[in-house]
Image (spheres, rainbow, N blue to C red):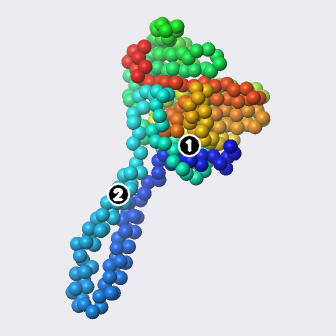
Amino acid sequence: MNEVDLLKEFRTEVPAQQDVRKEKERLLAKIEHENAATASGVADRDVTTARNARRRPVVRLRTGLALAGALAAVAAAAVVVPQLGGRESVSPPIVALPEASPSSAVKVLENAALVAARTNPAEIRPGQWFYMKEAQHDMGPDFETWNRMDGRRSAIREGGKLRVGPPEKGPTHSGKTQQEVEALPTDPDELLAHFRSLDKLRPLLSLCQPNCPEGTEKDVDVFGTIGWYLKFGPMIPADTTAGLYRALAKIPNVKVEENAVDGAGRQGVGVVLDLGRAGKSTLILDAGDFHFLGVKNEVDGRTMAMSVLASAMVDKPGDTS
């Protein structure tokens, strides 16, 4: 599917907010116009009767109803997003996708940002654990991990048994990731500048390094690194998540693909970095609340994929929600 055909049925998750003041002025002007027309048609009546006709209670009722309707429309435009303390991959999208005109990556990712900004994540306590169930397709069975947020312990489920041990020392430790995201800027331009200034980034899956088209090497790493942080959704502050989505829209060669499918077979919205013959990387987002589902890289006819099947902040290892 080409870019012109993207998201023909994609909905607008967060409609533009109406200006109630302007709507009120428009409605009042319309009512005055209608009243003036009524008054001109009663020339055979005396002036007092005409004035009384303009002040009938029904006019005030219509005004009140019209303004109430405008306020109701604005209220209906507000998006209520549930607290995202944990996410299960089997949950259906919050709202089905209605028919809509094609949408650009900027529009879709702005919608994702607005939804993210309205989430209300729970406050994270040092003694809590971050749980994640992942699948690295074609590389073995699914695996589940727990990392205590203060960095003291970690756990993994192997062969059906839960093993609790020393903390994970690598860059994947959740407490370390939390410290990093809390230090990230939320402005998309500043986010991109920050990532591009780093010598080492951590993309989810390698796309074409070290053979990317000249001038795209940093874009590839930044795109993948944003995916890395989105994977930790329940622990990412709402404004930071919004900034990450907006930053994606500013990366060259990024487009949106409807009905993208992750490695687990789940359908969602694909945010695609397409480098032609060098390959393409797709971050798949849930079509309902835009949370991260997984990543899929396609190079030379080969596909590599990783999926987040579930994630949550929990109180102890073994808990999954």
Q: Position of residue 213 (x, y in %)?
A: 77, 34
Q: Position of residue 319 (x, y in %)?
A: 41, 17
Residue at the spot 22% in from the left edge and 85% down from the top edge: 49
Is 15 situated above or below 172? Answer: below
Callout 2, which amino acid? Answer: Leu
Horizontally, residue 142 falls left or right of residue 73, namely right
According to the image, label 1 marks what residue? 109
Q: Position of residue 163 (x, y in %)?
A: 48, 7
According to the image, label 2 marks what residue? 71
Residue at the spot 67% in from the left edge and 32% down from the top edge: 281
Give the camera-side residue of 22 and 309. Answer: 309
Q: Quadrant of the C terminus?
A: top left
Q: Is residue 131 visible?
A: yes
Horizontally, residue 57 falls left or right of residue 150, namely left
Is 251 situated above or below 68? Answer: above
Give the camera-side residue of 174 and 14. Answer: 14
Classed neighbour count for the residue bearing mark 1: other residues with Cα under 10 Å, few (<14), some (14–19), many (≥20)? many
Residue at the outermost bottom position: 44
Q: CA distance from mark 1 to mark 2?
A: 27 Å
Residue at the spot 67% in from the left edge and 50% down from the top edge: 4
Q: Position of residue 197 (x, y in %)?
A: 64, 32
Q: Secondary structure at mark 2?
A: helix
